[in-house]
Amino acid sequence: MGKLIYVAFPLILSFAVLSLCQGVAAVAPPHPKLQWHYYEFNTTCRYAEEYVRHQVQLVWDHDKSITAKLLRLVYSDCFVSGCDASILLDEGPNPEKRAPQNRGLGGFVLIDKIKTVLESRCPGVVSCADILHLATRDAAKMAGAPGYPVFTGRKDGMKSDAASVDLPSPSISWQDALAYFKSRGLDVLDMTTLLGAHTMGQTHCSQIVDRLYNHSGTGNSDPSMDATFRDNMQKLCPPKTKKGQHDPLVFLNPESGSDYTFRESYYKRILRNEAVLEVDQQLLNGDDPKEIIDEFAAGFEDFRRSFAESMFKMGNINILTGNQGQIRQNCRFTNKGNPN
């Protein structure tokens, strides 16, 4: 492992004494009120994590895209009001999931299914917030990401408002992206690592059409794009010429494509100027993210270790515990607003 990674991982090195199962990265202790295997040792739902993993496996076996959907769902939840499962709520005049930035979110049906199973076996015990994080960890590992510990004991939030959604544009500069991540307690390593989730998944052409045809209002394509890559993307994404025009989906990492596999090729594509989203290509413009990209492109295990650490950190943003929040009986509604 290179010098950069050793410097960047003091927490992993300091807490390597944690005794975790084989293949799971060691990470720093979480929020003090969260616990490792909380449900197994402190509740009547001893097998909660096994129930979650089984349901994820059933879906993943025939729909590999569930990994990308859940990763985006966690990001859209944690970066707004915190990791409180507010993104799952349908309740209210205009919940978070209806915000323009959250167009195309998926994975809700799987979370509903897991919640139904858990409520039938141990009602009122497992929060929707914990279900979301456990399911995402399991789906990511099935796709080739590292296993990482999800400490549990979160409570669910009770309000969701699209007006609170401030998720940035995919055309944001790397400096503005870093400021956004820092406002959530994350650093440049976390940003460069978590954007690596774009190693799988899709985006609508509308998110990149300006980059292909009218970058910064110039009437030309983004000059940072490799010419052959630009030509291929223009074949997939025609210019927008009329209202209501079809908006195709394109893979964020064609090398992963429909296999939805976790791999380091995302970083190699950035180095070749073949990133689909501008925010990803922008990372080359900063010395620190460029150094990280070089390291991850050359060492898949470095990326995997960093991904485990950064996912763990993201899962602790503004969580609710103890008497805060509630355990929602239905992930789409607060207990008071539950129509059933």
Image (cartoon, grey):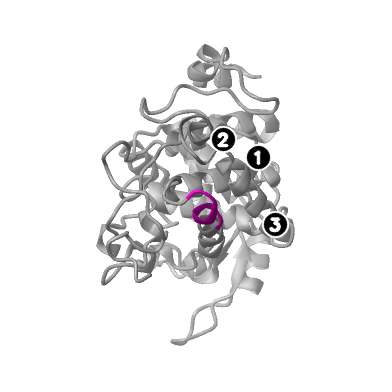
The answer to whether residue 210 shows anywhere in this view is yes
Q: Is residue 177 left or right of residue 110?
A: left
Q: Secondary structure at mark 1?
A: loop
Q: Which residue is mark 2?
A: 307
The residue under the point 73% across, 53% down is 255
**Is 286 rendered above or below residue 213?**
above
Residue 118 lies, in percent from the top left, at: 53, 52
Q: Please report the bounds of the magenta region as a residue range.
A: 117-122
Mark 2 Cα within 10 Å, few/some/many (few <14, many 20+)? Answer: many
Measure how far apart labels 1 and 2 are at the Cα level: 8 Å
Marks 2, 3: nearer the viewer: 3
Q: Is residue 89 left or right of residue 104?
A: left
The disc at residue 83 is none
Measure how far apart labels 3 and 1 are at the Cα level: 18 Å
Q: Which residue is mark 1?
A: 145
Instruction: Give 136 or 37, whichever is nearer the viewer.
Output: 37
The answer to whether residue 287 shows anywhere in this view is no
* First-in-chain label (1 vs 2): 1
Q: Which residue is mark 3?
A: 58
Give the residue type at disc 2: Phe
> Is 4 contained in the magenta span?
no
